[in-house]
Amino acid sequence: MEVSCPTCKKKVEWNDKNLFRPFCCKRCQLIDLGEWSNEEKVISTSTYDENANKTLPDIEDIEAMLAQQQQDFFKDK
């Protein structure tokens, strides 16, 4: 299978012999690493932001739920 090097777009064979896959060479691999370390590349936070509006339960709510489950468990015994 062939893929394009993410840095230079050169076609690269995807196999065990290519130590730098998906990159074509060590140079392209280091360029990419430098872009990540300089924060020129980032992982989008849009998924996180979409979930930010959902409120998480308070510890009191969790404790109440667990207490209810415990009561239900022993009630059935």
Image (cartoon, rainbow, N blue to C red):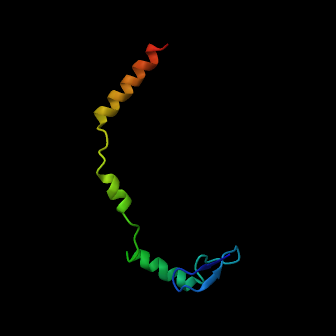
Q: Residue 76: image x %, image y %? A: 47, 14
Identified at 40% across, 71% down, the residue is: 42
On the image, which quarter does residue 65 sit in?
top left
Identified at 31% across, 53% down, the residue is: 52
Q: In this view, does 20 lie to the left or right of 66?
A: right
Q: Residue 31: image x %, image y %? A: 48, 83
Q: In this view, does 49 lie to the left or right of 24?
A: left
On the image, which quarter does residue 50 sit in?
bottom left
Q: Residue 30: image x %, image y %? A: 51, 81
On the image, which quarter does residue 2 sit in?
bottom right
Identified at 40% across, 19% down, the residue is: 71
User: Quadrant location of the N terminus?
Assistant: bottom right
Q: In this view, does 32 lie to the left or right of 14?
A: left
Q: In this view, does 71 lie above or below 29?
A: above
Count of picture labels: 0
Decide which of 76, 40 is in the foreground and name it. Answer: 76
Q: In this view, does 13 lie above or below 77?
A: below
